[in-house]
Amino acid sequence: MNIVVSSDGYPEKRNIMVDPENNYVNLKKKNIYLYINTLRQKVFKKNKIFIFQPFPGMISDNGDIIHLFNEVARTSSRWVSTFETEIPRVLPVAGVAKTQNPELHALMRLAARKECVRLIAISEATHRIQLKLLDAFPTLKDSIAAKLCVMHPPQPLLTDKVRKATDTLITFSFIGNEFYRKGGAEVVMAFTELANEGLIDPQKIKVNLIGDLGRRHNIAHHHYQDNDSFHHQIEALINKWSFFHHASSLPNTSVIELLKQTDVGLLPTWQDTYGFSVLEMQACGCPVITTNVRALPEINPSYAGWLIEHKLNDMFEFTVDSDQTKQKIRNTIISQLKGYITDVVHDPGSINRRSAQALTRIRREHDPRCFQERLKDIYLSVG
């Protein structure tokens, strides 16, 4: 089949462009809104509109169906959209409540039209967020809700070897380009405290830290960002302890090889719409310690990993509304992280058991072939 996409970036490759039997036609430069958005943003200083409207005649010549990510379409052709938070996606406007935004109402009507045949949430958390949004649109709710389904992204197994950790040396790996948003600082602080308290032997652990220390802005902290002193402290601790091994970035092939040699993955993230790195870790036989934001409880259940629990808001995220609440969340992350690290250091067998379950979970719940078949059924059901 010829599947029209509006971009060929990571989200599309991860969630849409997954079947080698299909031909994917990227019409990014044939999207009228590519040019409208350029004017809106550069000239009029307005928000981007997440919409795909192809120039006339483009679809009939190029595709059987359109499959978008985080966008809706204005077209007479049938289309599908995969989304990670809400659909339609509308950026906030100062002084305007989200559900009162005229742009949201206009785009919501596009999602209700017959040309929109399926809206694919990437997690159950996303599905629930969408249903809550639809409560504000009672006349459209039923027609749009009927198009919703949940499809977790596919993930091929990257090894069939269950981890066989011992207490001789346990290797932990944190991977997150946005080092601070993904919880890198909390990893550094947790291991530092454990070493200072004598609860871990620095000679028997190795902690890989892959992430850009220059990416200091944490979107989850809103107006309550950490100061330069905090960042300097974290960098000093990384340099102090020999068990930390930091790299700003690695090629994906190197990351995968690193994960295959890792006993426990680390993603104590402050904010994530999904957590694709968790799937890659698990597919390498590496169980993971994560927070409980968004989809992470769905993809990192206790039998396959370890979950740091903290109260969430109705978007399944942390609420940071003061420096005090930020510090409270940080303390929770560090405390539970320390507990899990101590547990696995004293019981390496727990790593091995979860490694086996992580591989089983990926095989059962993220099988690429099953994902391809489900998409094919969606495409053919609207042909």
Image (cartoon, rainbow, N blue to C red):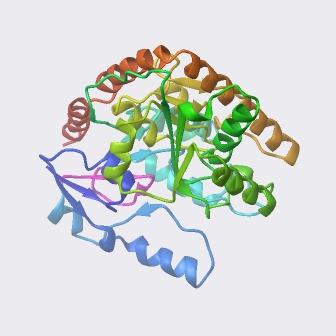
In-front residue for pair 23/380: 23
Q: Position of residue 305 (x, y in %)?
A: 50, 23
The residue sitting at the bottom extreme is: 43
Task: Please give left or right for residue 50 compared with residue 76 in the image.
Answer: right
- The residue at the point 70 percent across, 50 percent down is 237
Q: Position of residue 43 (x, y in %)?
A: 58, 85
Residue 231 in which image quadrant: bottom right
- The residue at the point 51 percent across, 55 percent down is 107
Task: Please give left or right for residue 290 compared with residue 314 in the image.
Answer: left
> In which quadrant of the rendered image does the C terminus lie?
top left
Image position of 338 with respect to 48: above or below: above
- The residue at the point 69 percent across, 25 percent down is 199
Task: Please give left or right for residue 277 compared with residue 254 in the image.
Answer: right
Q: Is residue 147 visible to the viewer in this orientation of the structure?
A: no
- The residue at the point 27 percent across, 31 percent down is 159
In-front residue for pair 336/193: 193
Q: Position of residue 249 (x, y in %)?
A: 46, 58
Residue 229 in which image quadrant: bottom right
In-front residue for pair 170/211: 170
Residue 147 in which image quadrant: top left
Q: Is residue 47 visible to the viewer in this orientation of the structure?
A: yes
Q: Position of residue 32 (x, y in %)?
A: 38, 73
Magenta-drawn segment: 64-80
> Is residue 173 on the magenta stretch?
no
Image position of 308 with respect to 266: above or below: above
Task: Please give left or right for residue 215 compared with residue 193 in the image.
Answer: left
The residue sitting at the front extreme is: 203
The tally of labels here is: 0
